[in-house]
């Protein structure tokens, strides 16, 4: 891989030098290509090693650069950002101007584990569709989904196109509009099949979502989604507890 060229100059002035260098690298870094070494940057711009490290550290923190031990520092694609909201992956990617796609890994009809059966309101012998799909944006693997859906609500699900929006399919073919969900988020490291399927190194940080989605008062979906932490981020708007309490008071 060739290193990017850096024609800009770092000047004395009101803007700190590390910030100037950060801006130069952010403008010129090409995803997948290495930036020059700290020694080269120091020599090129006549700044201290501490200034160079601070500029690079800032870009690593912002998710634009990634250090790879023994190889150097590389530019990476910015993370996809999202605000927490009820939408399918397809809707989410379309909203940010990206092309979503899905690869079906497997679908089976099985008796789900007890915790999943309870979440879906199923009896001990009721069956559900077990669906695994890989989700991509602009051809890049973003997430792996393991989902469960009651067979009684979605008969013949395996006969439909499962590489597009399931929420649209549920609404158009089964008259089920997903209009509510409970969702939990945590972090873990990629291992095993998850790392292999989303094409990331072992121990890559992941964002894991557990969602139970409903149509009206009927649970329809139980899904675990593993998102690559180096390609996806979450933002949310927060208010004070007092404000939230006021918002719940009927007018």
Image (cartoon, rainbow, N blue to C red):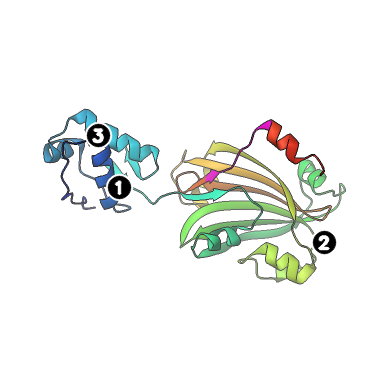
Name the mark on residue 153: 2
Secondary structure under tag 2 reads loop
Estimate the x, y position of residue 87 in percent, counting from the top left: 64, 56
**Image check: 161 left or right of 226?**
right
The answer to whether residue 30 is magenta is no
Between discs 2 and 1, the one toward the N terminus? 1
Residue assigned mark 3: 16
- Please rate how many residues cluster around mark 1, counting C-alpha atoms within 10 Å: few if below 14, some from 14 to 19, many from 20: some
Question: In the drawing, what numbered circle is on residue 26?
Answer: 1
> How far apart are the alpha carbons under marks 1 and 3?
16 Å
Q: Secondary structure at mark 3?
A: loop
Q: As drawn, is 214 to the left or to the right of 66? A: right
Q: Which residues are magenta?
A: 234-241
Q: Is residue 70 visible?
A: no
* Residue at position x 18%, y 49% in the image: 6
**Which residue appears at 54% of the width and 63% of the height?**
94
């Amino acid at each position: 891989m060739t290193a990017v060229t850096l024609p800009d100059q770092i000047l004395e002035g009101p803007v700190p030098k590390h910030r100037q260098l950060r801006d130069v690298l952010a403008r010129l870094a090409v995803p997948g290509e290495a930036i020059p070494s700290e020694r080269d940057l120091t020599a090129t711009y006549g700044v201290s090693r501490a200034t160079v490290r601070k500029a690079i550290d800032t870009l690593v923190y912002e998710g634009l650069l990634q250090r790879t031990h023994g190889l150097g520092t590389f530019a990476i694609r910015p993370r996809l950002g999202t605000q927490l909201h009820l939408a399918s992956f397809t809707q989410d990617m379309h909203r940010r101007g990206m092309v979503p796609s899905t690869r079906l890994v497997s679908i089976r009809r099985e008796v789900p584990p007890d915790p999943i059966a309870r979440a879906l309101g199923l009896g001990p012998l009721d069956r559900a569709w077990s669906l695994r799909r890989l989700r991509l944006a602009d051809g890049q693997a973003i997430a792996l989904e393991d989902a469960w859906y009651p067979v009684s609500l979605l008969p013949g699900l395996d006969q439909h196109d499962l590489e597009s929006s399931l929420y649209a399919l549920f609404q158009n073919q089964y008259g089920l509009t997903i209009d509510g969900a409970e969702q939990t988020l945590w972090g873990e490291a990629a291992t095993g099949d998850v790392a292999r399927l989303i094409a990331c190194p072992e121990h890559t940080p992941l964002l894991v979502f557990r969602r139970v989605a409903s149509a009206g008062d009927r649970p329809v979906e139980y899904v675990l989604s593993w998102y690559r932490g180096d390609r996806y981020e979450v933002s949310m708007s927060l208010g004070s507890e007092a404000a939230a309490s006021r918002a719940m008071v009927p007018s």
